[in-house]
Image (spheres, rainbow, N blue to C red):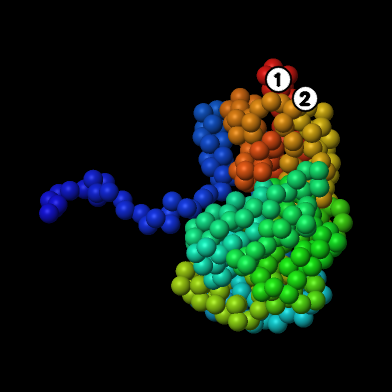
Amino acid sequence: MPSATMTTTELELRLATRMSRLGTETAFEVLNRARALEKQGKEIVHLEIGEPDFDTPENVIDAAVNALHHGWTHYGPAAGLPDLRQTIAEYVSSTRHVPVSSDEVVVVPGGKPIIFFSILALIDEGDEVIYPNPGFPIYESMINYVGGRAVPIPLREERDFSVDVEELASLISDRTKLIILNSPHNPTGGMLTKRDILGIADAIGDRNIMVLSDEIYSRLIFEGEEFSIMSVPGFKERTILLDGFSKTYAMTGWRMGYGVMRADLASQVARLMTNSNSCTASFTQVAGIEALRGDQGSVDKMNHEFRRRRDVFVAGLNKIKGFSCRLPKGAFYTFPNITKTGWPSKKLADALLEEAGVACLAGTAFGAYGEGYLRFSVANSLENLNKALAKIEAWTAKNL
């Protein structure tokens, strides 16, 4: 029997086996390393985090402050406030051109819970989930966590980082239960065209396979138009739409996203909310109503600025030895090919941080098919983007 004086640190931490299958999001690890270097006096240009550098619009902030003063500080329904769910239903009905009702909407603290809850609710051990690679790392992490089988669909540069529909069709099996799509895409900035989406829908056919359509960047498009698989006849009841407020309205710290899905699944996701978060903060939801219903000028302004930065940064990257970069069509990332540098992605990203003072992510942070690439976020000022380009160019002149 252990003595009463034994400290807890002397006892072995016995984690559940599933914790070994849980991944991470490298962006936050790199951010912590970059901040540690800054504390040592080193100047770092932060291009690692996918977060708008704009402030939340004033009308949204005012709505939240007003809500706080008017008592919106208590628990709300697990699925979200009725007024916000109705507002989201109307917004999605208008933008995706399908009828959506409020009982098909679940409001959650951020976009990630929709990924988490959808996979928890749908995937049993051994079920297969097809997901984009390179892609948002939480997809693969959560599939592995629940004991599912993660089946990558490679996104290749020669296809402008779109999905090869024939290859996707070849990956669908009797075990496929979920297909994850992301457009505009993190980390590549690629987009699925209407033709791509219709091809994917044809490949799925009438099989009982759900689609998680991550459209968190749907308002940050520079080339082409957003088209959701939810809009395809026969697919609304098989689609879980993920969207939110973080990227569109520069509300990353507010933690508010939502999922739109068939009502019977929505009720199950709401149960997961009850068992985890209880509810999303009420005053932020009131602000969310204002974000969707209020003036959209800030969204247009931010989109215009990201496009301007994209153009400048991609042009600059393409002048640097060993770098080549396609023009991303959406989101606020660039994904240059760095194979001609001769450096592996992780080693090069580490060197740029430690030696050049530029924080970026290795393509492999987004999966094995990200090798040979880096991801830079252009959610920083034009001044800092130009500073980063100069630092990278100076480093390559010395090291390549």
Q: Relative to 182, is 364 above or below? A: above
Using the image as rendered, state which of residue 380 and residue 324 is in the foreground: 324
Where is residue 217, by image quadrant? bottom right
1 or 2: tag closer to the N-terminus: 2
Label 2 neighbourhood size at 10 Å, few (<14), some (14-19), many (20+)?
Answer: some
Badge 1 is on which residue?
400
| Element under disc 1 | loop
Circle 2: residue type = Lys
Under mark 1, the amino acid is Leu
Task: Count neighbours of disc 1 (C-alpha within 10 A) and say few if under 14, some if 14 to 19, many if 20 or more.
Answer: few
Q: Nearer the viewer, residue 397 or 37?
A: 397
Q: Position of residue 144 (x, y in %)?
A: 52, 56
Query: Foreground: 31 or 325?
Result: 325
| Residue found 75% across the figure and 42% down from its top | 334
Please tell me whether mark 2 sits on a helix, a strand or a loop. loop
Instruction: Determine which of the numbered discs, if any, sits on residue 184 in the image.
Output: none
* Residue 160 horizontal/vertical position (percent): 81, 47
Quarter location, residue 191: bottom right
Q: Residue at x 75, y 71 (%)?
A: 205
Is residue 174 visible to us here? Answer: yes
Residue 321's tag is 2
Q: Mark 1 near mark 2, Cβ–Cβ under 8 Å?
A: yes
